Image: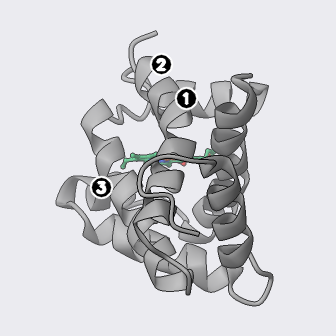
Amino acid sequence: MTLKGTGDYKVVFKESYARVSREDSKERFFDMFYDKFIASSPIVAEKFRHVDLRRQKRMLQKSLVHVINLYSDLKVPEELSYVAALHSRSQKNIEPWLYDFWIDSLLDTVREHDPDYNVDVELAWRLALAAGVAYMKFRYDT
Ligand code: HEM
């Protein structure tokens, strides 16, 4: 399917998400995402210096689902509210610009895991993540 910037991105996203979430490659997906994310900036690496990465990967898997759910129904689940508070200035101090590294590392990982990756798949993911990331950034000071 070639949408070229217009069309049903929800379907494109869901299909790509299903391809990269297959049980036999899910583990490798999250390993690669974390490696890329930590290599993306010395500031990101510093934030994770004392954190147990196995726990992080597990948590991220769960919270990615909440980020994505925000896209489809604009409801903020309790778990994401907790995660946002943890990342805010007063706790882990994850500054809003650091989320670009998170998005780009995730997209690089999707590109390497999804055999049908193309520009429409990339846009579908960016749209799907946008609401959740906007929410996380908004909660930096609130
Ligand atoms: C939408 C994007 C993000 C999501 C969904 C997310 C999700 C999570 C989750 C679920 C946890 C574990 C919470 C817990 O321990 O109960 C976590 C921890 C953490 N996140 Fe994020 N995160 C995001 C972006 C970022 C970014 C951009 C950074 C920048 C470096 C970051 C840095 C951290 C750190 C340092 C921790 C560890 C906290 C600790 O246990 O000390 N996160 N994140």
Mark 3 lies within 8 Å of ligand 1 (Cβ measured): yes
| Residue at the image point whose x is 70% and y is 55% from the top | 11
SS at badge 2: loop
Looking at numbered disc 2 in the image, what kind of residue is underneath it? Arg
| Residue at the image point whose x is 21% and y is 60% from the top | 41
Query: Residue 115, position in %: x, y?
Result: 55, 87
Q: Is residue 95 visible?
A: no
Q: Which residue is mark 1?
A: 84
**First in sequence: mark 1 vs mark 3:** 3
The answer to whether residue 137 is above or below residue 128 is above
In this orientation, which residue lies closer to the viewer: 35 or 12?
Answer: 12
Residue 106 horizontal side relative to residue 98, left or right: right
Total numbered labels: 3
Alpha carbon of mark 1 to alpha carbon of mark 3: how far? 17 Å
Alpha carbon of mark 2 to alpha carbon of mark 3: how far? 19 Å
Residue 4 horizontal side relative to residue 121, left or right: left
Q: Residue furthest left?
A: 42
Q: Which residue is mark 3?
A: 44
Q: Residues within 10 Å of mark 2 (few under 14, many from 20)?
A: some
SS at badge 3: helix
Looking at numbered disc 1 in the image, what kind of residue is underneath it? Ala
Q: Which residue is mark 2?
A: 139
**First in sequence: mark 2 vs mark 3:** 3
